[in-house]
Image (cartoon, rainbow, N blue to C red):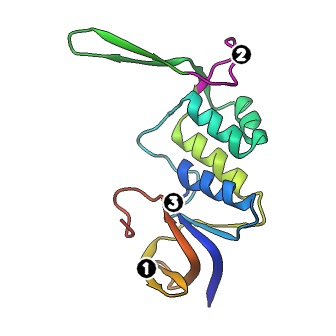
Amino acid sequence: MEKEYDVIVAGAGPGGALTALALQKEGVNIALVDKARFPRDKVCGDALSGKVVSILRNIDRGLADKLSVFPEKIGSWGVRFVAPNTQSLDIPFKSEYSTGEDAPGYISKRIDFDNFLVEEVKKHNHIDFLEEWEIGSVETDNTGVRVGSKQNGSTLHAKLLIADCGAHSTIA
């Protein structure tokens, strides 16, 4: 049986999860699919700059507030790049919401931050979160896009597919 959605978001990392959270606020019916089971780890991206915190706040102020008390993070005020000759360049994080005393950004392992976002996704009625659902096929027609699961042959249909599933994705 095929399930119908307004939007399918492929990839439940920070970009995909935040896309789903932003769209659900507008009443959009979303399928968020990911080939992994959460929590899962990723190799990169442990730094959350002040821009990330601002984006969270713009999507949902409560989400940014929850992150500020999330125990699986430490504060970060910037990044330092060091060349082989030991010369360095400091790039401070800035946030319009930081008081100077509070860190404008954070460091959090991807396994923790991504799961934090997925747990928020699971709280919303307009988002169906499908774990271990790897896209095996993509077909488009005049009604939208149909994606099929590699694992179980089920299909989803939507008006729009947003691919946020990395360089090795079937969609890419």
Crowding at mark 2 (Cα within 10 Å: few <14, some 14-19, many 20+): few
Residue 93 in sight in this render: yes
* Residue that numbered label 3 is attached to: 11
Residue 13 in sight in this render: no
Ranked by sequence position, the earlier of labels 2 and 1 is 2
Q: Name the secondary structure under disc 2.
A: loop
Ranked by sequence position, the earlier of labels 2 and 3 is 3
Picture coordinates of residue 154, whole percent (x, y): 55, 84
Picture coordinates of residue 40, whole percent (x, y): 52, 51
**50 and 149: which is toward the camera:** 50
Image quarter of residue 77: top right
Image quarter of residue 84: top left
Picture coordinates of residue 63, whole percent (x, y): 73, 41
Q: Quadrant of the C terminus?
A: bottom left
Q: What number is the disc on residue 138?
A: 1
Picture coordinates of residue 74, whole percent (x, y): 61, 23
Residue drawn 58% across the image and 51% down it: 39
- Relative to 108, does residue 16 appear above or below in the rendering? below
User: Which three-letter amino acid code belongs to the residue tagged 1?
Assistant: Val
Residue drawn 71% across the image and 16% down it: 99
- Relative to 14, does residue 167 appear above or below in the rendering? below
